[in-house]
Amino acid sequence: MILRMPFPGTGEMPWHIDWMPRKKNSEPIRSVLSSLLLDDYYKENGSTSVIPGSHKFLKAPDEDGYIYQEHPDAVYVEAPRGSLLIWDINLWHRGNKNINGKRRRQLNINYRDVNIWQQINFKKNLSKELFDSFTEAELYLLKARDSDPERNDWLFKHRNNFFVKKGLNLLLDLKGA
């Protein structure tokens, strides 16, 4: 779970997906992102742009040359506070600059396949006291049990590097994931 709150004049992100692209359309959806809008969401306060149908593309936006420039099929997501947006992790999207300075807070909750790294390494970032208060089910949901593998923070930090992506895809192929 992550809170995103771009301050005035900030918030612009490049086009991206939140994991590696699928190789075949027959592969299952590995993750979905849900965003609970805590404020009204519109173009002037930097709402997210999406490319409808791009979750079916078998590549990331940068592989098509899209970084920060406008995309001809881009749509600004506009919705009132309290809305819940849910999308496939492979949908091409980007945050835009908060031009008018009005608040645009959103709570992002990412639901991932157990084989995909967490965005937050809970084993590393939560206190022992907090861990001791969790039930076995809560530890499972956080992927924070002793039996859960540690996230490799270096690989996670460099996950969008071309060579790291290729290596990770090769490992997933070998695992049959």
Image: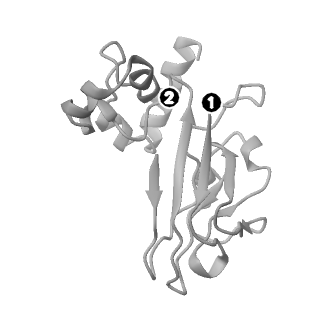
Q: Quadrant of residue 65?
A: bottom right
Front residue (pair 172, 82): 82
Task: Give the amino acid type for the residue marked by disc 1 in the picture.
Answer: Arg
Q: Are marks 1 and 2 in contact (CB under 8 Å)?
A: yes
Q: Secondary structure at mark 2?
A: loop
- On screen, residue 94 above or below 60: below
Q: Quadrant of residue 164?
A: top left
Q: Residue furthest bottom?
A: 100
Q: Earlier in the sequence, mark 1 or mark 2?
A: 1
Q: Position of residue 90 (x, y in %)?
A: 65, 43
Report whether residue 130 is seen. Answer: yes
Callout 2 crowding tier (Cα within 10 Å): few <14, some 14–19, many ≥20: some
Callout 1 crowding tier (Cα within 10 Å): few <14, some 14–19, many ≥20: some
Front residue (pair 99, 145): 145
Q: Position of residue 123 (x, y in %)?
A: 29, 30
Front residue (pair 65, 113): 113
* Residue at (73, 29) in percent of width and height: 24
Q: Position of residue 69 (x, y in %)?
A: 61, 71
* Residue at (44, 76) in percent of width and height: 10
Q: Secondary structure at mark 1?
A: loop
Task: Give the amino acid type for the residue marked by disc 2 in the picture.
Answer: Ile
Tell me the number on the disc at residue 116: 2
* Residue at (34, 18) in percent of width and height: 145
Instruction: Give the alpha-carbon distance from disc 1 to disc 2, as whole Å.
Output: 8 Å
Left or right: residue 57 compared with residue 153 = right
Q: Position of residue 103 (x, y in %)?
A: 51, 76
* Residue at (45, 20) in percent of width and height: 137
- On screen, residue 158 above or below 151: below
Front residue (pair 165, 107): 107
- On screen, residue 134 above or below 106: above
Left or right: residue 154 compared with residue 36 = left
Residue underneath mark 1: 30
